[in-house]
Amino acid sequence: MKQRPLRFVVFLLALGSVFGFLYTIPASADNVYASIRGVVTDPAGAAVPNAMITATNIDTGIVTKTTSSGAGNYVFPQLAIGNYRVSATGPNFKTFQTNSFILAVNEVYDLPIRFELGSASETVEVNAEAAQVVT
């Protein structure tokens, strides 16, 4: 008679172990990204739609592209943290390009792009010292 309760206890322990492996609490991923956002404008301050904006991760060589909206807004929502350079092109404007800057975890980097009149073969380099917004 002693073996039957012992077998039952072993059975319950084994069953508990199986359910313990099957039922796990999902882990929440930490946000290890940053973003860049801004508005593209012409020399008069008017929005520039359909400008091509490129963010290049200098450390990895990964290039991410987007275009500005009808209101001139653009966003790169999930960029890996690291060292970046941003460039932008638009018809009848000089190419816009920043120096390199570092994106930190959860950072929202505000980068307004102001085009200058000229051909796309001309480049305007900007030292990106814009105000930062962290959310």
Image (cartoon, rainbow, N blue to C red):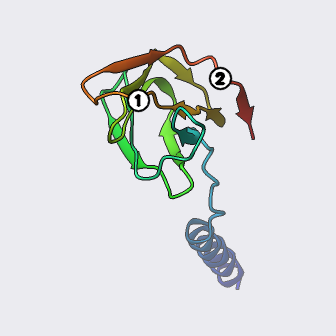
Quarter-wise, where is residue 57 in the image? top left
* Residue depicted at 33% across the width and 26% down the height: 60
The total number of labels drawn is 2
- Give the percent coordinates (x, y) of residue 113: 53, 33
* Residue depicted at 37% across the width and 21% down the height: 59
* Residue depicted at 45% across the width and 27% down the height: 116
Quarter-wise, where is residue 135 in the image? top right
Left of 29 or right of it: where is 1? Answer: right
Element class at badge 2? loop
- Give the percent coordinates (x, y) of residue 121: 24, 25
Q: Nearer the viewer, residue 111 or 135?
A: 111
| For discs 1 and 2, the disc positioned in front in the rendered view | 1
- Give the percent coordinates (x, y) of residue 83: 46, 21
Counting residues from the start of the chain, the first of labels 1 and 2 encountered is: 1
Q: Is residue 24 above or below residue 101?
A: below
Confirm or deny contact between disc 1 and disc 2 (CB under 8 A).
no
- Give the percent coordinates (x, y) of residue 20: 63, 67
Quarter-wise, where is residue 97 in the image? top left
Q: Name the kind of residue labelled 1 in the image.
A: Leu
Q: Which residue is mark 1?
A: 117
Q: Which residue is mark 2?
A: 130
